[in-house]
Structures are given as C-alpha cells and as structure tokens.
Amino acid sequence: MVGLGNPGPEYEATNHNAGFWWIDAVAREWKVSLVPERSYFGLAARVNRPDGPVWLLEPQTYMNVSGKSVAALARFFKIAPNEILVVHDELDLMPGQAKLKLGGGHAGHNGLRDIHAQLGSPDYWRLRLGIGHPGVKAEVVDYVLRKPKPEAREAIEQTIEKTLTVLDLIVAGEMERATMKLNAKPPRPKPPKPAPPQAPDGRDTPAERTE
C-alpha cells in the first residue's frame, strides 16, 4: 500500500500529501512505524497480517518520480500491479469524498503518471481522496501545493477514518466488497409519514375513532 506525497516539512500539510496522511493513519491503526529504506527510495514498514505480509510505503523521491520507489519494492518482492494500492489526492472529488477503483488513466496526476511508466501497467488499485478543484486549470499546480482550509482538512481526515473501515477487506483482497462499501451512496432519508386526516372541528374522523 503506497501513499503519494512530497517529502519535507514544507509539504507535510499540503493537499498533494493526502496519500501520506492515509498511510500515517494506517500505521497508527496497526501500531507500526515507517523507517527509511534506501533500497526502495522511501519510508516503509513491513506488517505481518493474518492474510500475509503487507508493505506500507511513502516514496521520498518527490511526487514526479514516485514510480521509482514503487517499482523498486514491487520488483524485489514480485508484487503484481493488481496487488498494489496507491492512495493519492484527487482533484475531481470534493473534500469528504473517496473512491476506490482498479486501473484507468492518470488524469494528469504526475505521481500516477510515473507509476504507470515504471510498472509498465495502469492496472493497479487506487484510493482517491478528494481535495476539490480550484476551478481554474492554471491554478492547479499552486493549489495542490497549498494547505487545505481547516474545514477541508477536517473533511479529508474524516474521510480517511471512513476508509479505514474497509481496510481489513482491502488487505484480505476482497476489493469488490471494499469498493461497494466505500463507494456506496448513503441511503436517502424516507419522507415523513402524512399526518392522519382530521375533521374540520379538530376531532378524529369516524374512520379513526375507536370505541
């Protein structure tokens, strides 16, 4: 499981580092610490789970070269693309939204673009954490490197907590169930029941009167 972001304190709280925030949350949940792994160009932790070992990875290569880190670990342990989950910030979703999907394009995301190139395949899983869009394409670069507004950061953190409810399904490889649970829209509230009819004087109608 890979979270995308940029290394260094100046980037730590920026929109582009939402993937790092997710990996940090998983590490807290599993009570593990990521340590520098020079061979994989990132911070990493190997976690032994009932379903087998799981790697947590935060590439320290800067976003545009994320694939160098992901591919190094994947090749060494012979991890197939469809066994990889990449968690990243998503402009096309609002803060508070998250979507799980397999494969697809990189939609201009430089981290995904490099992972595509280094793995030689787009067929890996992505967990897209919404950060919203500035509204103007020319502002995207500055926007992703800015800190989100406090209410947006709170919404993203709440979404990360929500995604942790499907973490066991993801680790078990039950991606369809995880996708359905995470992507499901909340049920629409039922309309209120109509009030019982009343006679003009306010008394119950004969049909409702009980003897």
Image: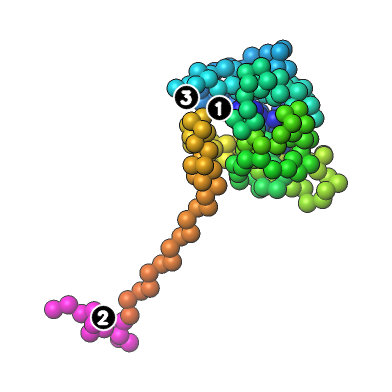
Residue 204 tag number: 2
Closer mark to the observer between disc 3 and disc 2: 3
Query: Residue 34's x, y, as percent?
Result: 61, 17
Count the numbered circles shown: 3
Q: CA distance from mark 3 to mark 2?
A: 63 Å
Residue 207 lies within the magenta run: yes
Q: Residue at 70% of width from left, 48% of height from top?
A: 92
Residue 26 lies within the magenta run: no
**Residue 78 vertical placement versus 181 (above, below):** above
Residue nearest the observer in this picture, 68 or 98: 68
Query: Residue 52's x, y, as percent?
Result: 50, 21
In the rendered image, which quarter is residue 100 located in?
A: top right
Closer mark to the observer between disc 2 and disc 1: 1
The residue carrying mark 3 is 51
Q: Secondary structure at mark 3?
A: loop
Closer mark to the observer between disc 1 and disc 3: 3
Query: Residue 76's x, y, as percent?
Result: 66, 17
Q: Residues within 10 Å of mark 1 (few under 14, many from 20)?
A: some
Say which amino acid is labelled 2. Answer: Asp
In the rendered image, which quarter is residue 73 located in?
A: top right
Q: Please state if 59 lies on the left or on the right of 197 as rendered.
A: right
Say which amino acid is labelled 3. Answer: Asp
Q: Main secondary structure of the magenta part?
A: loop
Say which amino acid is labelled 1. Answer: Val
> Which residue range is magenta in the image?
198-211
